């Protein structure tokens, strides 16, 4: 049945796709062995480096972000290699599970799912590894299940302070193009992402940005790989092609999305996300609800996780938002299922969309009978209207 007006897609990915990107994708599918395709490939392979802030190669797979997780591991590591992971939330947990299934020796440091990776802990664990058997440190930059952003530059410093040679592998699926990230300057070895969050594309592309050290590791890595192998990808990419059929139409969209990001300016994009996150937190505090993230220096610019009052089910509340206001909010994932919901404020998003989103949340709280104080929207509007 037709629902009038626009759906509010306020989950933290997939995000709203700009009309310009949709139009760019709506082209006849091309011959991926043609000179025209090579021109497109050169454009996007060069353009995407400006988003990762790297001079090194970025490989693009037709896959979801999970594929980028697997690619980062199978290209750099060997069976039985020790990797250090931090369970900051459901995405960190899933990536660690994937690593176990690949046959890696996964060391998990637990957290309360309300904070990011502790750089001091990183330094401590790496210093204690006197045999230097840990081969990689896996960090989720923006933990999408909780709304916590880990401090990658401090984590890099911690690895250096310990004088440890481990690779730094960073999941930037929900941070790239929304939160500052500098692959080269921050000394990341593999930064991975997907298309459907900050890059404002539909799902279907995944990316690995690769350092020289990661390339070197790939030359001795023994984990089995075929579809995900960087080698043939890098060789073919150098000539403007791919070893198998790329997601051609999504690459048209990617070219447009990169252009859009530079028109606004990456710094402005990051500042917009931080401002929308601050306005959202102002609303949540005024409602008298709890923000999942407990550290001010780790608040996510991309989404805000909100804890439900005891005895109230987050999914029942989200159903009200969906049925009555045609708005999708993010579910609590993993151990937060039913206990928290997530407000996505990322991608192609502006002040009035945020005002509508927060109005929808406030009205849904009332309709669902959740105890809260009125005035959250007002608090957010004051911040958005401040001079
Ligand atoms: C969305 C997301 C993923 C998984 O991406 P899929 O495209 O669903 O495979 C991984 N990590 C983080 C942090 C994410 O937000």
Image (spheres, rainbow, N blue to C red):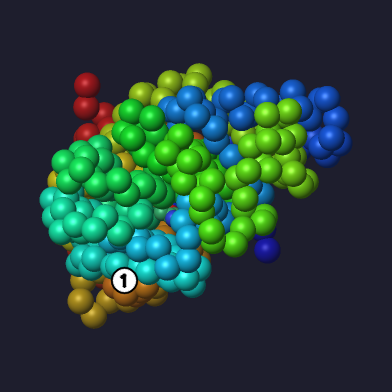
Number of callouts = 1
- What is the quadrant of residue 60 in the picture? top right
- Expressed as whole percent of the image width and height from the top left, the position of residue 310 reads 20, 76
Comparing 315 with 385, the one in front is 315
Q: Badge 1: how crowded within 10 Å, few (<14), some, or many (20+)?
A: many
Residue at image coords 76%, 47%: 244
User: In the figure, 351 relative to 4: above or below?
Assistant: above
- Expressed as whole percent of the image width and height from the top left, the position of residue 26 reads 76, 37
Residue at image coords 67%, 56%: 226
Secondary-structure class at tag 1 = helix
Comparing 284 with 334, the one in front is 334
> Position of 161 compared to 185: left or right?
left
User: In the figure, 313 relative to 46: above or below?
Assistant: below
The image quadrant where one finds the C terminus is top left
Comparing 221 with 295, the one in front is 221
Identify the residue under disc 1.
336
> Position of 35 compared to 383: left or right?
right
Residue at image coords 62%, 53%: 228
Comparing 2 with 26, the one in front is 26
Residue at image coords 48%, 25%: 55
> Position of 170 compared to 198: left or right?
left
- What is the quadrant of residue 23 in the picture? top right
């Amino acid at each position: 049945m037709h629902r009038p007006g626009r759906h509010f897609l306020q989950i933290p990915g997939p995000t709203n796709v700009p009309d310009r990107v949709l139009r760019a994708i709506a082209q006849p599918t091309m011959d991926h062995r043609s000179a025209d395709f090579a021109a497109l490939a050169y454009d996007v392979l060069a353009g995407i480096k400006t988003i990762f802030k790297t001079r090194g190669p970025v490989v693009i797979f037709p896959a979801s972000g999970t594929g980028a997780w697997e690619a980062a591991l199978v290209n750099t590591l060997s069976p039985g290699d020790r990797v250090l992971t931090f369970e900051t939330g459901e995405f960190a947990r899933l990536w660690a599970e994937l690593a176990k299934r690949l046959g890696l020796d996964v060391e998990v440091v637990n957290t309360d799912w309300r904070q990011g990776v502790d750089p001091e802990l990183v330094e401590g664990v790496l210093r204690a590894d006197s045999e230097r058997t840990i081969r990689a440190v896996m960090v989720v930059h923006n933990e999408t299940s909780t709304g916590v952003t880990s401090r990658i530059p401090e984590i890099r410093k911690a690895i250096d302070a310990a004088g440890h040679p481990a690779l730094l592998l960073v999941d930037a699926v929900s941070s790239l193009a929304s939160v500052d990230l500098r692959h080269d300057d921050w000394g990341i070895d593999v930064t991975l992402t997907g298309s459907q969050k900050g890059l404002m594309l539909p799902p279907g592309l995944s990316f690995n940005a690769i350092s020289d050290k990661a390339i070197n590791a790939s030359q001795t890595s023994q984990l089995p790989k075929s579809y995900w192998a960087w080698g043939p990808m890098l060789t073919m990419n150098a000539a403007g092609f791919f070893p198998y059929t790329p997601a051609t139409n999504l690459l048209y969209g990617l070219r447009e999305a990169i252009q859009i990001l530079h028109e606004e300016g990456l710094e402005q994009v990051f500042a917009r996300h931080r401002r929308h996150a601050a306005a959202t937190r102002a609303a949540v505090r005024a409602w008298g609800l709890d923000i999942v993230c407990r550290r001010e220096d780790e608040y996510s610019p991309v989404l805000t996780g909100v804890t439900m009052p005891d005895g109230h089910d987050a999914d029942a509340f989200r159903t009200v938002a969906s049925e009555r206001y045609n708005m999708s909010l993010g579910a609590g994932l993993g151990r937060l299922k039913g206990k928290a919901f997530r407000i996505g404020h990322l991608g192609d998003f502006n002040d009035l969309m945020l005002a509508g989103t927060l109005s929808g949340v406030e009205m849904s709280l009332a309709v669902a009978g959740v105890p809260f104080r009125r005035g959250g929207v007002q608090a957010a509007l004051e911040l958005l209207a401040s001079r």
